[in-house]
Amino acid sequence: MAKQKMSIVCNGETGANIMPTLIFGSSAIALDYDVYIFFCPAGAKWTVKDELEKFGQPKGLPNPIKLFNDILDQGGHMTLCELALENKSIDPKTVRDSRIKITKAPPYLMDVEGAAQTYVF
């Protein structure tokens, strides 16, 4: 039986956007979901090197860098919206991990077709 898919969209640049994205993503991985995270232009900064480091460790919450890395290390899929490159002046060379796919929304939507759950933060 195939794993159930979970789609998570990060659409903002505050801690209130990235922390639930990462907490839900890592929790879903632990529950054996196939996790897909899409970073819209508004949330794109979280895919850039050193941005999570600048954010730091929120009091009483898990380490965001560890969560981010754990999701990728355990087979989660992360996509940066291609539109963010121009919109947010992001050089693809500054993306924090080579496993982050850069593409537009339609391929992401095709990847998550049939997702059991979808969350937007």
Image (cartoon, helix red, strand yellow):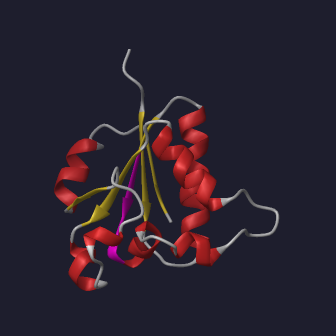
Q: Compare residues 20 and 117 and report the one nearer the observer.
A: 20
When asked about the image quadrant of residue 113, the answer is: top left
Q: Compare residues 121 and 74 and report the one nearer the observer.
A: 74
State the residue at coordinates (33%, 54%): 98
Q: Compare residues 107 and 64 and report the one nearer the observer.
A: 64
Q: Residue furthest right?
A: 60
Q: Quadrant of the N terminus?
A: top left
Position of 12 relative to 33 (above/below): below
Relative horizontal placement of residue 99, taking residue 74 as reference (left or right): left
State the residue at coordinates (43%, 75%): 45
Does the stretch in magenta take in 28? no
When asked about the image quadrant of residue 40, the answer is: bottom left
Where residue 25 sits: x, y (%)? Answer: 53, 48
State the residue at coordinates (36%, 39%): 115
Relative horizontal placement of residue 82, taking residue 23 as reference (left or right): left
Q: Is residue 25 visible?
A: no
Position of 28 relative to 121 (above/below): above
Where residue 35 sits: x, y (%)? Answer: 44, 42
Where residue 67 sits: x, y (%)? Answer: 60, 52
Q: Is residue 17 visible?
A: yes
Relative horizontal placement of residue 86, taking residue 53 as reference (left or right): left
Where residue 119 sits: x, y (%)? Answer: 47, 55
State the residue at coordinates (43%, 73%): 43
The stretch of residues the image draws in magenta is 36-41
The rendered magenta stretch, by its main secondary structure, is classed as: strand
Position of 72 relative to 120 (above/below): above
